Amino acid sequence: MEKPLSGRFRVLDSIRRGGPISRVEIADACGLSRSAVTGVVQSLQHEGWITEVQELAHGNGNGEDPARHDPGRGRPRVNLDMNPNAAHVLGVKLSLHRMSVAVTDFRGDVLHTTTLPFNGSQHPDIAADMIEVGVRRCLIEAKIDKNRVLGLCVAIPGYINNLEGLCYWSPIFDRDDVAFGPLLSERFPFPASIENDANVVTLAEHWFGEGRNLSSFAVVTVEHGIGMGLVTHDRLYRGHNGIGPEFGHAKIEFSGRPCRCGQLGCVEAYAADYAILRQVLPHFSLDSYSQDPKAYHVEIERITAEAKAGDQALTAEFAKAGRILGRAIGNLIATLNPPKVIVTGEGLRAGEMLFAPLVKEARKLQLAGNRFETEIVAHLWGDDVWARGAAALVLQQAYMDPPALIRDSAPDSAELPSQALA
Amino acid sequence: MEKPLSGRFRVLDSIRRGGPISRVEIADACGLSRSAVTGVVQSLQHEGWITEVQELAHGNGNGEDPARHDPGRGRPRVNLDMNPNAAHVLGVKLSLHRMSVAVTDFRGDVLHTTTLPFNGSQHPDIAADMIEVGVRRCLIEAKIDKNRVLGLCVAIPGYINNLEGLCYWSPIFDRDDVAFGPLLSERFPFPASIENDANVVTLAEHWFGEGRNLSSFAVVTVEHGIGMGLVTHDRLYRGHNGIGPEFGHAKIEFSGRPCRCGQLGCVEAYAADYAILRQVLPHFSLDSYSQDPKAYHVEIERITAEAKAGDQALTAEFAKAGRILGRAIGNLIATLNPPKVIVTGEGLRAGEMLFAPLVKEARKLQLAGNRFETEIVAHLWGDDVWARGAAALVLQQAYMDPPALIRDSAPDSAELPSQALA
């Protein structure tokens, strides 16, 4: 059996989502008994991760009805909330043309982001150098001591084994089988890990976004390629050997357009940035695929702007991409019937001219007998949120088990949180 | 958050899977601390669900190396094992032409099965009558007192909401929206529930079969239609509102063959029993779909036998069905990348003439870069195993929380299991 989500994780995550929140509400939210919650809360307070806040009966600060919680008229109610400054974590998102670094507090709120140019097909040592530069700059700009950082996670497109820090393949590197996690760990005084970028944006949706209140949902990412992430039973689903879904290579037409993977008819061969681009600009054919990755980015942005300005031929290309993606999402719904599918990624810059045909096609494919329609939503957000998702992955680990930082310096007796961590 | 798998479930399931097993091994298997395991074990022993067994150092009965566990040479080691006779549960599988009833012990081992004819498109009251007859007969034949039965689960093809006992649609009934769970509960002195049949066979694979040691895997069922079940994070995945995957209606060709659902190109329109039949025998067309469901069963068995006997045209039909199903499974692997896909159901009576082309096609679609091949296995087993899966669903609930049977009659002090439950 997998290691379960620990009581520590459940309590911290409930406080992060609902705080300030009472012990009783925590027990309800996280499915644990009240006595179990009391024990966990006690040690979290002792270690300085959470703190008690007293509120008067006139409201709990959430705009909720205070009468629901308050046992006695006018008596102050004692809630629990995160101590956001208890520690910090770092998240990095690498794409073919850019690097984003985010530093967050213990609640996952972004304190600062730094964006730097980046080039794909990089030597791993150079990629690590650049991450080191980006991280150092971000911490300096945010005035955060590196010794207060619990860890770093780097989000990378490609085949990633998060557990062992292995990158089997990525357009980011000039080679296969890079032990990038261990390579990064040598450079920082805190643990460093890597994760597939679609997985971290899925975690970001679960922690902060459209999947915030759901135990299961799917995320489809439209970028240079097409990716997917999945949450089931409140947890990120990772496939065989940590290599998650490769939804971009689900087939829509079995003798269809050639995909960059070498096969025919994959959904990304119709709907990803590179696929739209090669339909419109012949010099972006698969044969010339190794050209400057930044050119793709510049050109797809230009084409999208021209389509939005009224170019009918271009609009039709985006609509077709949307319809094909709608078919793939229709099949995804048939396969998983999730309550929600969240479509995100830079490809959504095309807006309704891609998304409206997508939803229409997916709805057309829905089974008549199934009257519980899967919600399909578009969620366009920037690279900093992917970095925030990577940071959340570090926090997830720190919520599961006490991080070393604190384990080594745990106070002998209960002190104020700010003292406990000074 | 979903209610977590309880410590009680984790400990009981580890003992069921590995017993006789030591406390230390249980802690390793179920991801709990040793102290947590000790507490749970104590109350399970007290309630009579598990029992201590002493073993000599020369082996633990599992054929494993005893030195790994045994702390002192020749000293008897104390293990824990299920008390299988602590209680019984019932599972029923309904198909268009047959009903199977299984009664199992507390470990899920089948003690007896009863099979009766059944007709689809039935009035719910009549279906309930027939289930009552089948259950009564099974208990009499097995000589089991109905007061020792913890519960009953009925597996039904169609749209089922297990939580509320609602059947939105099923070929089993002559109408939609049947509150069949509550209807059954009135007839028995124990709780009765319903579940989608693909979900229960998936649970059977997880508890007893090809998915026994996996935290995630997918099951594809080939019967009159095509279904799917999914385990992630050690639990059955249920989709939106409890309505799980409708994989049979994932599209393979978007303007392809008409499906009985009214759409075009669904995988089951090529690979399900009914689809093969209508290709071969024109009077099984979609237009004549309401004919006697038993005729499908009789004829598909006959055709399969003729194909196996060497009829080339028929063999080609089965091969085509296998290829199309292989494409759908290729897309399923792209979408989920599970460690294993288990293909099961009566459609596997066709054996290698269906399964070999299936595997070949699915392999052809596998991404070159992904070197962790999803295992694809065929697992042909009978209706009694579906019924056993339904029984396992009742046991799952009984493992999660103490069942009422015991809660009402818990002994005040530790007694022998047989006495505790007398």
Image (cartoon, coloured by chain):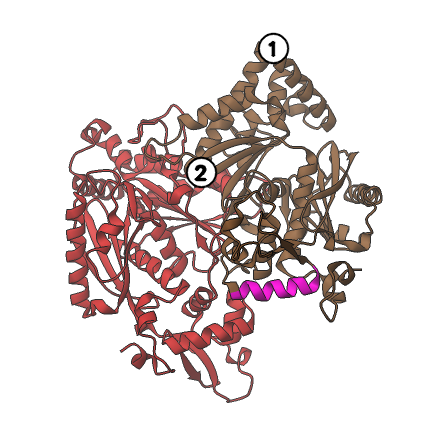
Chain colours: A red, B brown
Vertical order, A186 against A404 (above or below): above
* Residue B297 appears in view: yes
Residue type, numbered disc 1: Gly
- Residue farthest along the bottom direction in this orientation: A74
Query: Residue shown at 52%/39% (left/top)?
Result: B218
Q: Nearer the viewer, residue B371 or A202?
A: B371
* Residue B292 appears in view: no
- Magenta residues span B35-48
- Residue farthest along the front direction in this orientation: B74
* Mark linked to residue A166: none
Whole-percent x and y of residue B187? Answer: 81, 52
Vertical order, B37 against B82 (above or below): below
* Residue B6 colored in magenta in the image: no
CA neighbours of label 1 inside 10 A, class few (<14), some (14 to 19), many (20+): few
Residue A387 horizontal side relative to residue B395, left or right:
left
Alpha carbons under labels 2 and 1: distance apart? 43 Å
Label 2: chain?
Answer: A
Whole-percent x and y of residue B178? Answer: 71, 47
For residue A55, which quarter of the picture?
A: bottom left
Front position among marks 2 and 1: 1
Vertical order, B42 against A185 (above or below): below
Whole-percent x and y of residue B75? Answer: 58, 57
Label 1: chain?
Answer: B
Q: Which residue is mark 2?
A: A361
Q: Nearer the viewer, residue B420 or B204?
A: B420
Q: Which residue is mark 1?
A: B310
Query: Residue shown at 50%/60% (left/top)?
Result: B32
Instruction: Tell me the SS state at disc 1.
Output: loop
Residue type, numbered disc 2: Glu
Secondary structure character of the magenta stretch overall: helix
